[in-house]
Image (cartoon, rainbow, N blue to C red):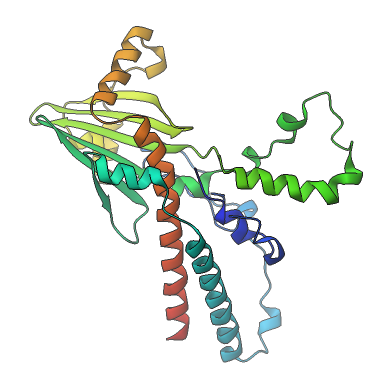
Amino acid sequence: MMSLRTVARSAPRTFTRLSSTALRSSRVAQPSSLLKSSWAPLRSSQFTSAFSTSQFRQAPEAEVDEALIAKLENELEFENEMKATEQTPASVLDFLANSPFKLKDEPGKEDVSLVRKFGNETITVTFSISDLANFEPDDMFNEDEVLGDDVDPTEGKRSEQSEGEEGLDEELEGGDAPVPCRLNIVVEKPDKGALNIEAVAQDGQIIVENFYYFKDGRMAHGKTADVAHAAQDIYPGPPFGSLDEDLQVLMERYLEERGVTQALAVFVPDYMDIKEQREYQAWLKDVKDFVEA
């Protein structure tokens, strides 16, 4: 279950105690680093905030610095308060205690990896907290889906003030934010290349999107620009959905046997939320320390 802290961050402070979802609208969305062939538009005005510096031109530099430092300290205090009231999800504790995967989480990096051995195979599952920034808030609250096409959206406006906020609070507190978490799964064998599976962890399930094979295992990772470019020229296989249904089922069972299971599908979004909060707090502290120096 995803926490709702990032909605609380971007909301006015009078509503921050509603609860905290994986949608910080104040941050610029960036494409997941796990997608090798994803396309992202250039930055446009819709992702930027217009501001004017004219009001600060006559203000002493120290005054602006002090105001910024105070605000950063306030945000750090707010994050610490939310963290103090939250407990580590049981899904995270159970997975880390019982899973054969070893967690690799480097502070300051967006990507997290799970690595294990399975016979002569090395299995790596990678996911990124950038998916949280990419998730669209409107996807959670689609008025047409909630009301239906034949319902007048203006009906019942008189009770909106009294019931609207309460309903939103219950929606957020319910907590099942359907944030899809992209997985890059690599199964390698010595001198045999690698399978590269692109999948999504969502609603406690692993949804396979592509099942590729590379004779050169390095192509499955694409850690450098040269390798990623070379991989684009190789035929890795057909779209997963175009395969025979029985073949799809067997390939999914192949992954389950190697630990890509429902437990992992539940663990990833929960851990991703913990990671995002930790990195955000570190970012606030680093910026504050820089301004203070």
Q: Position of residue 207 (x, y in %)?
A: 41, 26
Is the residue 48 above or below the residue 256 in the image? below
- The residue drawn where x is 84% and y is 50% is 162
Vertical arrangement, residue 191 with respect to residue 39, above or below: above
User: In which quadrant is the C terminus drawn?
Assistant: bottom left
Can residue 49 be seen from the camera position used here?
A: yes
Residue in front for this viewpoint, 146 or 72: 146
167 displayed left or right of 139: right
Count of numbered labels shown in the rendering:
0
Q: Position of residue 185 (x, y in %)?
A: 29, 34
Tell whether 131 sits left or right of 225: right
**At x 11% / y 26%, what residue is drawn?**
192
Q: Quadrant of residue 64?
A: bottom right
Percent from the top left, x then y, of residue 29? 52, 50
Please name whichever residue, 45 or 244, is drawn nearer the observer in this view of the structure. 244
Which quadrant of the structure image shows residue 7? bottom right
Residue nearest the observer in this picture, 182 or 175: 175
Q: With respect to residue 156, does 79 lie above or below?
A: below
User: Which of the 4 quarters of the picture holds residue 234?
Assistant: top left
Locate residue 104 relative to residue 13 in the image: left or right. Answer: left
Residue 147 in percent (x, y) is at 77, 30
Above or below residue 216? Residue 81 is below
Q: Nearer the viewer, residue 72 or 163?
A: 163
Residue 244 visible to the viewer: no
What residue is drawn where x is 71% and y is 29%? 145
